Image (cartoon, rainbow, N blue to C red):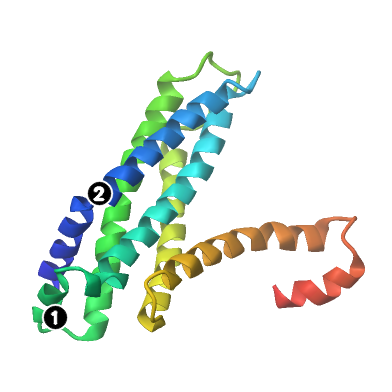
C-alpha cells in the first residue's frame, strides 16, 4: 500500500491543478496583506483573520479537487491500470488515497502557513499595540484547521465511494464544509440571542 500512496502523491504533485491552487493560495495571502491596510489599529490581527478564513476555504477546495482527480476521475486517466495491478482490497485503495491526499494537503498547509507567517511578521504597515501570538498558538491553530479539513476529506471520500459521478463528492464536500461551519453560529444565535424567535428555537434547535 505504501507504493500506491507514493504513486498517488507523485500524481498529485504533477497535476497542473496543484500549481494553480498553490498560486491561488499565495494570492489569498497577498489579499490578506492588502486587507490589513483597512484596519487603523490592528493590521496584523486583521491580516491573520482574513488569511485564516480564505486559506481554509482554499485548502478545502484543494483537498476535494485532489480527491476528485485521484479517485473520482481515475477511470478517465491512464493510471487506473496501475491501481488495479496492486493486490489490494478496495478499502486499502480508499485508505491509500485518503493518506495521499492528506499528505498533499499537509505540505500545502505548511507552505501557506509559512507564507502567512512571513506576511504577518514583515508585511504590517506598523506595529500594533497588542501583538498576536505567532508561536505555539499559531501552530496550534493550523493544526486544528488541518484536523477540520481531514474530517471534510473523510466525508468526501465516503461520497466518492458511493457516488456514480465524479462531480458529486466535490459538491457534497463543499456543502458539508459550509453546513458544519454554519451550525455553530446558528446554534449560538438560537440559544443565546434575545432576538431569536421562540418558534425557531423549538423547531430548529432540536434538529441541529
* 1 and 2 marks in contact (CB < 8 Å): no
User: Image point 17% across, 74% down: which residue?
Assistant: 80
Residue 86 visible to the viewer: no
Work out whether 13 lies above or below 26: below
How many callouts does the rendering have? 2
Q: Residues within 10 Å of mark 1 (few under 14, many from 20)?
A: few
Q: Residues within 10 Å of mark 2 (few under 14, many from 20)?
A: few
User: Image point 12% across, 76% down: which residue?
Assistant: 81
Observer-side mark, 1 or 2, equals: 2
Give the residue pinned by disc 1.
84
**Label 1 SS:** helix
Q: Quadrant of residue 138?
A: top left
**Label 2 SS:** helix
Residue 78 visible to the viewer: yes
Q: Where is residue 161 in the image (x, y as percent from the top left)?
A: 36, 80
Q: In which quarter of the image is residue 162?
A: bottom left
Q: Which of 185 and 81 is in front in this view?
A: 81
Q: Position of residue 74 (x, y in %)?
A: 24, 71
Q: In this view, does 158 lie to the left or right of 6?
A: right
Q: Nearer the viewer, residue 41 or 158?
A: 158
Work out whether 157 lies above or below 178: below
- Mark identifier at residue 16: 2
Q: Is residue 187 left or right of residue 200?
A: left
- Mark identifier at residue 48: none
As measured in the structure, the alpha-carbon distance from the residue carrying label 1 to the one carrying label 2 is: 24 Å
Q: Position of residue 123 (x, y in %)?
A: 44, 20
User: Image point 34% across, 66% down: which residue?
Assistant: 68
Work out whether 120 lies above or below 96: above
Q: Earlier in the sequence, mark 1 or mark 2?
A: 2
Q: Position of residue 43 (x, y in %)?
A: 57, 23
| Quarter placement of the N terminus | bottom left
As drawn, the residue found furthest toward the front would be 76
Amino acid at each position: 500500500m505504501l507504493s500506491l500512496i507514493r504513486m498517488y502523491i507523485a500524481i498529485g504533485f504533477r497535476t497542473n491543478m496543484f500549481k494553480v491552487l498553490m498560486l491561488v493560495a499565495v494570492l489569498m495571502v497577498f489579499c490578506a496583506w492588502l486587507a490589513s491596510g483597512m484596519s487603523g489599529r490592528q493590521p496584523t490581527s486583521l491580516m491573520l483573520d482574513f488569511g485564516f478564513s480564505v486559506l481554509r476555504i482554499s485548502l478545502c477546495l484543494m483537498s476535494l479537487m485532489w480527491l476528485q482527480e485521484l479517485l473520482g476521475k481515475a477511470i478517465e486517466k491512464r493510471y487506473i491500470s496501475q491501481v488495479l495491478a496492486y493486490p489490494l482490497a478496495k478499502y486499502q485503495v480508499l485508505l491509500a488515497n485518503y493518506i495521499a491526499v492528506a499528505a498533499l494537503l499537509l505540505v500545502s498547509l505548511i507552505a501557506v502557513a509559512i507564507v502567512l507567517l512571513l506576511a504577518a511578521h514583515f508585511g504590517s504597515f506598523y506595529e500594533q499595540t497588542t501583538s498576536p501570538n505567532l508561536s505555539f498558538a499559531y501552530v496550534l491553530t493550523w493544526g486544528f484547521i488541518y484536523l477540520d479539513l481531514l474530517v471534510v476529506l473523510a466525508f468526501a471520500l465516503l461520497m466518492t465511494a458511493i457516488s456514480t459521478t465524479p462531480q458529486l463528492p466535490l459538491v457534497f464536500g463543499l456543502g458539508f464544509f459550509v453546513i458544519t461551519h454554519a451550525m455553530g453560529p446558528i446554534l449560538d444565535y438560537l440559544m443565546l440571542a434575545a432576538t431569536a424567535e421562540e418558534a425557531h428555537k423549538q423547531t430548529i434547535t432540536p434538529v441541529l
